[in-house]
Image (cartoon, grey):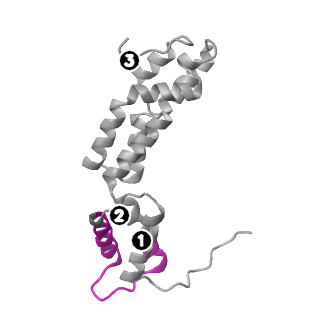
Amino acid sequence: MTFRRPPSTRPPLDSDGLERLALAYVSRFATSRARLRDYLCRKLDERGWAGGEGENGAEAAATLVERFAGLGYVDDRTLAEARARSLARKGYGARRLAGALTALGIAGEDAETARRQAEDGAWEAALRFAERRHIGPFAPSVPDDAARRRAFAAMMRAGHSFDCTKRILESAPGDVPTWDD
């Protein structure tokens, strides 16, 4: 037995309805311009467009997104920097950040500061990740080969560079390395 959502009985969207949806969305979520535009286009696909003659729903959504960006409701650069700080606190690396920014639709100049931030703090983030996962210098004992392979894979999935990962995994338990060593 499959359950299907009944067709929407809600009226098609006009400019005011689209703006109300956008305001509700940005008030609930930290979002990027691309994500807001995708959300509005999805709602237009679901409900249709009842705007004035000569108006296109997708164009109205794009105009609304740019207006919200101009008002500061949506700020891709600030969102990218916040995501970089959040991932660094959790111990994730620059490659993981790049994936997150791509998923948010943030690129170019808006993402550059966040990328630079992640690259500058790469060693500290790698150590933080190793500490959280009890690997390398934070392991309770010298790991066997299988545990080393799992730790290597975990650090690579977390977005750390090969050099950082190798230095951390080569460290003896209790001997926390510095990048300058």
Q: What is the number of the mark on residue 153?
A: none
Q: Secondary structure at mark 1?
A: helix
Q: Residue at x 69, y 71 (%)?
A: 3
Q: Is 34 or 117 nearer to us in this picture? A: 117
Decide whether the magenta segment is chiefly helix, strand or loop. Answer: helix
Residue at 29%, 66% (x, y): give it. 71
Q: Is residue 71 left or right of residue 95?
A: left
Q: How many residues crowd mark 1 within 10 Å: few (<14), some (14–19), many (20+)?
A: few
Q: Write down the residue under mark 1.
A: 23
Q: Magenta stretch: residue 55 in it?
A: yes
- Label 3 to label 2, Cα distance in Å? 40 Å
Task: Give the residue pinned by disc 3.
Answer: 179
User: Mark 2 highlights which residue?
Assistant: 73
How far is mark 3 from mark 1, CA to CA? 46 Å
Residue furthest to the bottom in view is 53
Q: Please name the amino acid that badge 3 sits on.
A: Trp
Q: Do tag 1 and tag 2 residues touch (Cβ < 8 Å)? A: yes
Sequence-wise, the earlier of marks 1 and 2 is 1
Q: Is residue 138 left or right of residue 161?
A: right
- The span shown in magenta is 43-69
Of 2 and 18, the residue lying toward us: 18
Bin the neighbour count of mark 3 within 10 Å (Cα to Cα): few under 14, some 14-19, many 20 and up: few
